[in-house]
Image (cartoon, coloured by chain):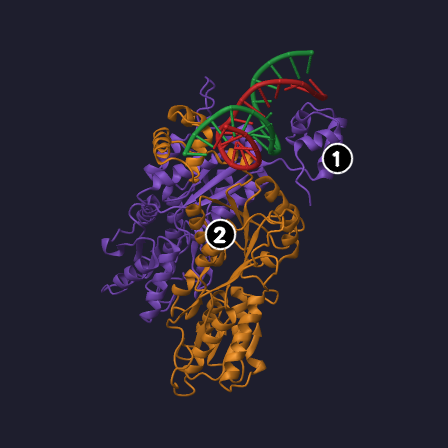
Chain colours: A orange, B purple, C red, D green
Amino acid sequence: MPKPATIIDVAREAGVSIKTVSRVVNREAGVHAETRDQVQKVVDRLNYRPKQSARSLAGGRSFLIGLLYYDPSAAFVGGVQQGATLRCREAGYHLVVESLHNDAPDLPVQVDRMVSALRPDGMILTPPLCDNPQVLKALRDSRTPCVLISPAADDPEHPSVRMDDVHAAEEITNLLISLGHQRIAIIKGAKEQVASRRRYQGYAAALKAHGIALDKDLVVQGDFTFPSGVEAAYQLLSRRQRPTAVFASNDEMALGVLVAAQRLGLEVPGDLSITGFDDTPAAARVWPPLTTVRQPMDEMARAAVDLLVATPRMGENASGIPAKPVQHRVLKHELIVRDSTAASVDKPARTRKGA
Amino acid sequence: MPKPATIIDVAREAGVSIKTVSRVVNREAGVHAETRDQVQKVVDRLNYRPKQSARSLAGGRSFLIGLLYYDPSAAFVGGVQQGATLRCREAGYHLVVESLHNDAPDLPVQVDRMVSALRPDGMILTPPLCDNPQVLKALRDSRTPCVLISPAADDPEHPSVRMDDVHAAEEITNLLISLGHQRIAIIKGAKEQVASRRRYQGYAAALKAHGIALDKDLVVQGDFTFPSGVEAAYQLLSRRQRPTAVFASNDEMALGVLVAAQRLGLEVPGDLSITGFDDTPAAARVWPPLTTVRQPMDEMARAAVDLLVATPRMGENASGIPAKPVQHRVLKHELIVRDSTAASVDKPARTRKGA
DNA sequence: CTGAAAGCGCTTACAG
DNA sequence: CTGAAAGCGCTTACAG
């Protein structure tokens, strides 16, 4: 196989200028239909594909989107990546991934290195990196458009995509209440992540709406890890008056509660109902499978790519044209009811509400 | 912030030619130490970073490595990706990921599109894509160097990195035998994946070495999925004479066996020992945690990147210089003994052998 | 040890 | 609707 065809080869064969080839390949308007067809034919025959580095150098767009993430094992990142690669492909972009330590001392340097070498057209940030001021500053300095996925707060500068944690937590708590549970414990997530606060908020709101007093003894701090779930569960289940249900702020911790319950000889959901959050693959692979909330990670990622592809480089329309307002999209979650939840043993199940 | 500095800016400021700046930045030999220092100082001051698209266009290297994978949820891919991004960063490369369907009708087109747009300097393929003839052909046509991770067979054309499935399966079977198990069932993996055959081979070899007859009734076909593990377990555990141990060919299926056992009211490991393969995150998050084999996914990925970075583009040394022989590296696995295995109830545990 | 020139393969901005 | 020219920011191949 000889060298790949260039735009010049195509132009020569088709008897047109390279500019016309460029127009056809980029689907620009203003080319005679006949010319277009003729050029397209040659493109197909020579199997011509524009070289990204040349386009990038001349045009100032790299057709690259970066995905910055921290925890590689997290199912969350996997879902985001999946959605992002697929949408990128549709849009003619490619996804470059970078795994960073959220507390690496040279984080800004690492970010800067990637950005200034690749000049990606946009960057997708997942928690907790999307809340890291150093990362955001490095990106701002380089004027790289960013979309934050599930950030701590809606940043006025960057568009974001997230789900409604408060509502989801409320719904899952309502489900437990509707099953007759009154003593519902919560294991909170990592302190620094705002999702933790939001989920707790939803839990508290649901209790309040149903006139159930919030019992401090039933609120335990976790950190989103499996061991913290085990630990928290032992604390909760050794109380003089056990909770009849535990709302773990994510699946990892819910899995920990399940393990702890099994080790203590408790039946789930007979003696204890458990709910998680995230719908990780493992949630459906344990017995009993976990009732949880599915975050629309792939759709969030697709939306993020869309925002980036449609957004001009920061500051490029500083010429007086008012920039579009920064968008903050909230996507729909889904309550996944499985077998880890059942009617409370304490009281008969009441009529379902809210779930 | 103004436009990023270019090589010309640096050259002007340092009072040298751009060629000298290029040499300093690329750490080429043959630059006077003083000149080097002086240039480096300007580079730092202006925060100069060579633009990848320009380097790529002029130099013919893209500094991009592609990772092609199929199953995004697989923990295997996560581990590979993690190792690959880290090693890429060290080597000054970046990782572009692409999720492909192994049986998409336009697979070759998708591969070709990525390769001809980006011209990555190398490609990492994971199973089952690394065994897909269409993918391999598309890559060969484009002369992109590839490294196969855990391929079906050692390809004479492409270097590969894998672990020793046969030995690992033998070890885990030996462990069960040493615990006194005689009726050890196996749930085989997906037929098309060679890892399935290799693991079965190791199982059979271990039984034979210990004079245990291979019982056809204890061999069940699975496909590496969780449901297939559940299904296979029901079959096995409803036999007139139950196995005392089940070797599932991966963790997903082992998780299925665990669920089935729990539903049937069997104690694990009291009534039944279970072993998996892969050491996925979930394996340590269930009760009892699974005895399994850890594949060195991150090290495999690092080795793959090393092979690519050191390998010249295919055919480029066709000028008479004999190419280095294609390397096939086998990395060490690790037996992870947890609580899903215990002495057989049928017979007293014998002295440990082999494990 | 250092540099001047050519060129990689496209797009942009401008003409016609 | 189409094209000729310039240029993006580097590296390669040569000279000296």
* Secondary element at image label 2: helix
Q: Identify which residue is drawn at 68% across, 22% down.
A: B30
What amino acid is labelled 2 in the image?
Val
* Secondary element at image label 1: helix
Tell which of A177 and A215 is nearer to you: A177
Q: Which residue is mark 2?
A: A305
Give the answer, above or below, for where B31 lies relative to A321.
above
To which chain does the residue with label 1 belong? B
Residue A313 in sight: yes
In the image, is A260 to the left or to the right of A192?
Answer: left
Q: Identify which residue is drawn at 49% across, 52% down.
A: A305
- The quarter holding residue B156 reads top left
Q: Position of residue B75 (x, y in %)?
A: 44, 53
Q: Which residue is mark 1?
A: B41
Q: Position of residue A291 (x, y in %)?
A: 41, 71
Give the answer, above or below, for where C9 lies relative to B78.
above
Crowdedness near tag 1: few (<14), some (14–19) or many (≥20) residues, C-alpha within 10 Å = some
Q: Are marks 1 and 2 on the same chain?
A: no
In the image, is B110 to the left or to the right of A137?
Answer: left
Give the answer, above or below, for where B135 lies relative to A3.
below
What amino acid is labelled 1 in the image?
Lys
- The quarter holding residue A271 reads bottom left
Contact flag, marks 1 and 2 (Cβ < 8 Å): no
| Quadrant of image for the N terminus of chain B | top right
Q: Identify which residue is drawn at 43% across, 34% down.
A: B159
